[in-house]
Amino acid sequence: MSTQTVFLHQALAQSVGLNATDTKCIDLILRAPDAAVTAGWLSDMTGLTTGAITHILDRLERQDFVKRVRDTEDRRKVLVRVRMESLQPLIPKYEAMGKEFLRLAEQYSDKELALICDYLQKTSEISQRELTKAIAANRSRTPDAAPAAPRRARKSQR
């Protein structure tokens, strides 16, 4: 199911010239307090490097999905906000998917839905913990700690 979900998000993103990572970054921005974040915050949340995040934000800004604005309280800080009007082409696609999920949910009793919700909440918490651990482990590695590439055997000289 995870693989299908990834490719579903990729297909939806491609329909507007983006990729799944782009749309997931948009989603993170929208869920943030005040719907504004820094590039550093996105890097922390995703585990992507700041360089990768800058590249994503550059692409999103070029396509008018986000805008960068100076923080009014700290002019050194640049905030990223989603341009809500840019999401219009995606809204019908996500609404259609949501309606399908609602139709599915109608097949279950309230008690069954409570169990499903409990399970999904717990799996989400586990996923978040594992993501946090993986990000921390990746960031704690130094280039010196990376395993060396295997050496090719030399042909012996006769």
Image (spheres, rainbow, N blue to C red):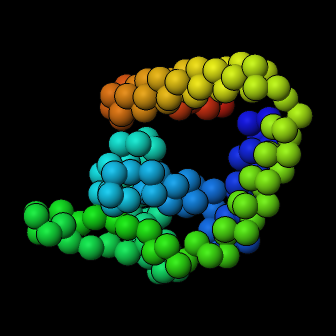
Camera-nearest residue between 135 and 67:
67
Residue at position x 79%, y 60% in the image: 96
Residue at position x 48%, y 80% in the image: 64
Residue at position x 50%, y 29% in the image: 128
Residue 53: percent from the left, percent from the top? 41, 57
Q: Which residue lies furthest to the right in this view?
A: 107
Q: Which residue lies furthest to the front in this view?
A: 110
Q: How many marks?
A: 0
Instruction: Examine the image and state in which quarter residue 89 appears.
Output: bottom right
Quarter of the image for the N terminus: give it: top right
From this viewpoint, is residue 131 visible?
yes
In the picture, measured across the screen, residue 54 lies left or right of residue 96, that is left
Q: Answer above or below: position of 38 versus 155.
A: below
In the picture, measured across the screen, residue 66 lies left or right of residue 103, that is left
Quarter of the image for the C terminus: give it: top right
Residue at position x 33%, y 28% in the image: 140
Q: Answer above or below: position of 1 versus 81.
A: above
Residue 57: percent from the left, percent from the top? 42, 67
